[in-house]
Amino acid sequence: AQRVTQPEKLLSVFKGAPVELKCNYSYSGSPELFWYVQYSRQRLQLLLRHISRESIKGFTADLNKGETSFHLKKPFAQEEDSAMYYCALRAGGTSYGKLTFGQGTILTVHP
Amino acid sequence: EAGVAQSPRYKIIEKRQSVAFWCNPISGHATLYWYQQILGQGPKLLIQFQNNGVVDDSQLPKDRFSAERLKGVDSTLKIQPAKLEDSAVYLCASSPTGLNQPQHFGDGTRLSIL
């Protein structure tokens, strides 16, 4: 069974401060991990995925298989980062497959 | 490219009534997903289509929910009869064929059951 846990429902930081959104997963095989973001009044959209190993909008996330984690980090938060963030898992090696989402973390960046 | 289109955006019905949602995926995307997102929770997959065939409907309450994807393009999701606990946002997503393809989401339909 696949399971994704985001332990923080709410996270508040000040502009310029570092931010880390936690994500832990449970899956017996080789997973694909994603972070999706939903800004106010916008649709859910892909932020980044672990296989790309890229930085998007200053965010990075590293898959740690030993700790089964995929935390999202940004060294200097901006007000426009305020949004709902979802961590999601998909069974690896499949050409298509369902996403299992965490409950989400609401990030608020204060000026 | 045009995104995933869903309609209606909002729907209010009374319990025991029926309701239908429509989704038009991104052109050329073979895989289509319907998710249910209850307030305060992450989206949960209800059903997944590959072209017009069902790949996964293990979490679809089949006594009241049904979905079809005629001709492998548009899809409809129906609830009959609706229950109070069906109040949620229903999201449609699509993805192209191929490994490691991300899913693209529509705006969703917000359903309220009175």
Image (spheres, coloured by chain):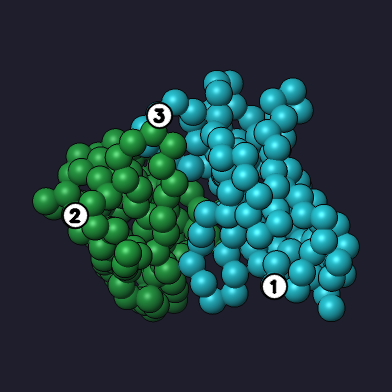
Chain colours: A cyan, B green
Letter of the chain that mark 1 sits on in the rendering: A
Residue occupying the point 24% across, 57% down? B27
| Residue at the disc numbered 1 | A80
| Residue at the disc numbered 3 | A94
Residue occupying the point 38% across, 76% down? B9
Labels 1 and 2 in the same subunit:
no
Kind of residue at badge 1: Glu
Q: Secondary structure at mark 3?
A: loop
* Mark 1 or 2: the one toward you: 1
Q: Secondary structure at mark 1?
A: helix
Vertical comparison of B60 with A78: above or below: above
CA distance separating discs 1 and 2: 35 Å
Kind of residue at badge 3: Thr
Q: Is residue A8 visible?
A: no
Letter of the chain that mark 2 sits on in the rendering: B
CA distance separating discs 3 and 1: 34 Å
x, y percent for residue A29: 55, 21
| Residue at the disc numbered 2 | B73
Vertical comparison of A63 with A79: above or below: above
Residue occupying the point 44% across, 26% down? A93
Q: Quadrant of residue B50?
A: top left
